[in-house]
Amino acid sequence: MKEFIDVTKILGDTERNSYYYAIYRKLEEIAQETERPDEEERYNQIKEIVIDALRNKTLTKRDFENVAHFYLVIDEINRGNISGIFGELITLLEKDKRIGGENPVVVTLPYSKKPFGVPINLYIIGTMNTADRSIAFLDWALRRRFNFVEVGPNPKLLSGKNVEFKSDSKDSRPIVINLKELLEKLNEKLLEVGVSRDQRIGHTYFIDANSPGKLYIRMYQQVIPLIMEYLYNDPTGLGKVLKSLVVVKSNGLVEIKDPCRDGIDEECLYKFGEMLRELTKGESRST
C-alpha cells in the first residue's frame, strides 16, 4: 500500500494558506530561480537600435521589403475626437512622410524627448458605422490620409437561405421565404421612401434567422423597431415599407400586426409567413 506524502513537509507551513497557494508559491520560486532571457532588456536593446536609426535617418524603403505587416484597428473612428486620437501626429500618416517613404518625417515626442515616426509597414484601419453617425462631419484632415471602402449590406451572403413555414391544416401549403429577397425588398422600399443608403438594413440581421421562430423574433424585436425609428414621422412611408406587417389608419396612426402577440406557436408563425409573402410581393393597405 502506497504511503500518503504530507505536502506541508515539502512546501512548508500551510496552516494559514491552502495547499493550492502553497503549490503556487513553490512554483513561483522555481520560476524565479530558472535562468531565462530578460525580455525587457531585449526589448530595450531593440528599442535603442530603432531610436538610433530614427535619429540618424538611416532607414529606407529597402529596410521594409521583407518585414511583417502590422495593423492598428480603431473601431468607430467617426465617433471619436480625431484631434484627441491623433493630435499633431496625423501628419505622419501620409504615405510619403512615413519611415521608408519618399519624404520621411521624424518628430520629437514632447514628454520623452525621443524621436518618433510611423513606418510604411503599419496599416491603420478605422471602422465607421454610418448608421449611427454620419461621416458628413468627418475631419477633412482624416479624409485626405485614408482610403474609404464602403461595406454595405451583402444580400449574396443570404443566397440559398430559406425559411419554411408549415401549418397543421391540410388545405395549407408550406410557405417558403427567401431571406435574400426579403432583405433586398426591405432596402429597396427604404430607399424609395427617402431613407439614407447609410441606414439600409444589414444582412447580419438575417444571417442566422434559419427558422420561423428566429425570423419572427428578429423581425419584431429588431428590424421592425429600427424601421419605425427611421420613419417615425412618416406613417405613409412606413406602410409602404412594412406593407402587410402594419396597418396605417386614416388618422395617421400606425398599428403593428403581430399574429403571435399572445404566444408563439406553429399556426401564428404560419400567419407571419403569409404576411412576409405579401410583404415581398403585395401592396400596402390602409384603413
Image (spheres, rainbow, N blue to C red):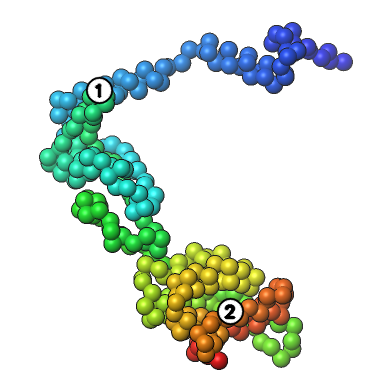
Helix or strand or loop: what does disc 2 sit on?
strand
Q: Is residue 42 visible?
A: yes
Label 1 vs 2, first from the N-terminus: 1
Q: Quadrant of residue 100?
A: top left
Q: Residue at x 19, y 45 (%)?
A: 94
Q: Position of residue 154 (x, y in %)?
A: 42, 68
Q: Residue at x 63, y 16 (%)?
A: 25
Which label is found at residue 49? 1
Looking at the image, residue 272 sits to the left or right of residue 92; the answer is right
Q: Is residue 50 visible?
A: no
What is the spatial separation of the Cα atoms under label 1 and label 2, in whole angstroms?
Answer: 67 Å
Q: Nearer the viewer, residue 246 or 23?
A: 246
Q: Which residue is mark 2?
A: 256
Amino acid type of the residue tagged 1 in the rendering: Ile
Looking at the image, residue 28 sits to the left or right of residue 86; the answer is right
Amino acid type of the residue tagged 2 in the rendering: Ile
